[in-house]
Amino acid sequence: QVQLVESGGGLVQPGGSLRLSCAASGSILKIYRMGWYRQAPGKQRELVADIFSGDSTNYVDSVKGRFSISRDNAKNTVYLQMNSLKPEDTAVYYCNALISLIGTMSLNDYWGQGTQVTVSS
């Protein structure tokens, strides 16, 4: 099986920065896509950014120019650098990965446990 472990959330003032990390471990053959979603209270979960195995990336409009997603393939880890944070960025951030496992032909979708990001003065 696979585990996604997130770290790096916390409390930050508006205009500040945080860096989230998500490390995947287990019987991983290949990671095709890794992404970050967020869910604020009373709102639906939304895709923040994702990155594919060829390093192409996508961002939701509200974070373009402020957030940057990257990955370290050797460590099966994805990062989300968040700059110029705003109160509306406050949410639980979830890591997601599309992974093929050793010994199978299927692709599976995995989620981390979530990490809280609070932007407040």
Image (spheres, grey):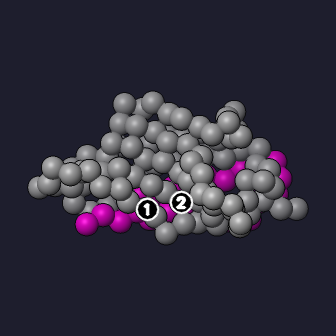
Q: In this orientation, which residue lies closer to the viewer: 61 or 76?
A: 61
Q: Nearer the viewer, residue 89 or 16?
A: 89
Segment colored magenta: 1-23
SS assignment for the magenta stretch, majority: strand
Of 96 and 46, nearer the camera is 46
Q: Residue furthest right?
A: 121
As drawn, the label of residue 111 is: 1
Q: Secondary structure at mark 2?
A: strand
Q: Identify the residue shown where x is 71% and y is 67%.
A: 41
Marks 2 and 1 close (CB-CB < 8 Å):
yes
Quadrant placement of the N terminus: bottom left
Residue identifier under label 2? 94
Instruction: Tell me the quarter of the image containing the C terminus.
Output: bottom right
Residue type at mark 2: give it.
Tyr
Residue 105, how many percent across, how many down?
Answer: 15, 49
Three-letter code, disc 1? Trp
Residue shown at 11%/55% (left/top)? 103
> Residue 9: where, in percent of width, then height?
63, 63
SS label for mark 1: strand
Spot occupied by residue 8 in the image (x, y as percentages of width and height): 59, 61
Q: For residue 60, which numbered disc appears in the image? A: none
Total marks shown come to 2
- Indicate whether 79 appears above or below 94: above
